[in-house]
Image (tube, rainbow, N blue to C red):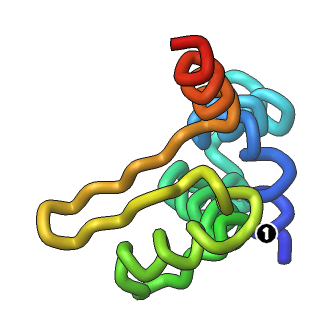
Amino acid sequence: LHREVVGSVHLQNASATMFRRQEALQTMDQGDLEPPHLYNSSVLRKAKQEQRDSVLKIVHGAHPITSLSLMKHSQPYAGSIYDIALDKAVVHYFTPTQLFLYKNQCKNS
């Protein structure tokens, strides 16, 4: 539970190294040994990855093309991912702003 909270709240906009450094500064004095409750950087990176995977609905062990296909048909990516090709792996995606500019340019030409 604590790992999920750290991944979702604290690591959302910070790197694992920066978060660990801030935690160490708050709990330790110069020359202290690392306390056992201070997470390793690898644990923090894994927590951040698990949080991102849950937000993106990526299933661990699933085929990447299957994950992309699920993302193509779910929010917020529906309408942004257009083509997924397996033979020569290619993914075509466009932001709504890019589509607007392209369609506007086509009308004016």
Residue 69: image location, x then y, percent: 49, 75
Q: Is residue 9 visible?
A: yes
| Most foreground residue, 57 or 31 | 57
In the figure, 16 relative to 8: above or below? above
User: Could you tell me which residue is drawn at 59 percent across and 12 percent down?
Assistant: 108
User: Could you tell me which residue is drawn at 63 percent across and 46 percent down?
Assistant: 34
Q: Would you say 41 lies left or right of 51 here?
A: left
User: Could you tell me which residue is drawn at 67 percent across and 28 percent down?
Assistant: 100
**Could you tell me which quadrant the N terminus lies in?**
bottom right
Residue 26: image location, x then y, percent: 85, 32
Residue 59: image location, x then y, percent: 54, 83
Q: Would you say 58 lies left or right of 91 here?
A: right
| Most foreground residue, 16 or 99 | 99
Q: Is residue 31 visible?
A: no
* Image quadrant assignment for residue 65: bottom left
In the picture of the structure, the residue carrying the numbered disc 1 is 4
In the figure, 100 relative to 86: above or below? above
Residue that extends furthest to the top in the rendered view of this protein: 108
Q: Would you say 49 lies left or right of 14 here?
A: left
Circle 1 SS class: helix
- How many numbered discs sit on the rendered protein? 1
User: Could you tell me which residue is drawn at 61 percent across and 21 percent down?
Assistant: 107
Q: Would you say 12 lies left or right of 93 here?
A: right
| Most foreground residue, 65 or 101 | 101
Residue 52: image location, x then y, percent: 65, 60
Q: Amino acid at mark 1?
A: Glu
* Image quadrant assignment for residue 78: bottom right
In the figure, 29 relative to 72: above or below? above
